[in-house]
Amino acid sequence: MGGVVHFEIPADDQERARKFYQEALGWRVEPVPGMDYNMVITTPMDEATGQPTAAGAINGGMMARDGEITNPVITVDVPDIDATLKTVEQLGGSVVMPKNEIPGMGYFAYFKDPENNIMGLWENLPAEQTGQAHE
């Protein structure tokens, strides 16, 4: 079963949206250096791994509203993005953005379901490729 691991909020004015979410909900919204993207911290997290410390809690991101990504996106963890996208297409969905790598972390993709909702997929890199050995 794919668990929800991330969300993304598109914004026309990221500074306005950052201020809104910081003041309305107390979230930390931090720009990612070198990218037009912000990390949205909604819950305490392990600063070393970036993972939430509370069970079931997730953090997210904020980016410019652009192209097909016009509404919030829920991102689901899957073991194999390519296989999942193939299944999505077989079931009447479509690929919005194919598999892309975030170096040192994993892969993401976006798909559209038969109801025209855009969802995200996430696939972690194997632990040996992230530099995070299992203890």
Image (tube, rainbow, N blue to C red):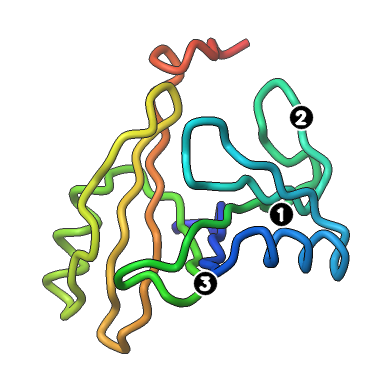
What secondary structure is found at the residue carrying circle 3? loop
Between circles 1 and 3, the one closer to the viewer is 3
**Residue at 48% from the left image edge and 31% from the top image edge:** 34
In contact (CB < 8 Å): disc 1 and disc 3: no
Contact flag, marks 2 and 3 (Cβ < 8 Å): no
For residue 67, what is the image quadrant?
Answer: bottom left
Is residue 135 depicted above or below 118 in this figure? above
N-terminal of the two: label 2 or label 3?
Answer: 2
Neighbourhood count class around disc 3 (C-alpha, 10 Å): few under 14, some 14–19, many 20 upward: some
Amino acid on which disc 1 is placed? Gly
Q: How many marks?
A: 3
Instruction: Find residue 96 and report its horizontal and vertical position in percent.
Output: 23, 65
Amino acid carrying label 2: it is: Asp
Residue, disc 3: 72
Foreground mark, 1 or 2? 2
Q: Is residue 27 left or right of residue 119?
A: right
Please provide percent x and percent y for residue 119: 39, 68
- Residue 135 percent location from the top left of the image: 63, 10
The reply to whether callout 1 and callout 2 are in contact (CB within 8 Å) is no
Check disc 2 and report the residue beneath it. 46
Q: Whole-Å distance between the Cαs marked 1 and 3?
A: 19 Å
First in sequence, mark 1 or 3: give its number.
Answer: 1
Label 2 – label 3 distance at C-alpha? 25 Å
Residue at mark 1 to residue at mark 2: CA–CA distance: 14 Å
Three-letter amino acid code of the residue under disc 3: Pro
Mark 1, residue position? 56
Q: Nearer the viewer, mark 2 or mark 3?
A: 3
Q: Looking at the image, is 15 positioned above or below residue 130?
A: below
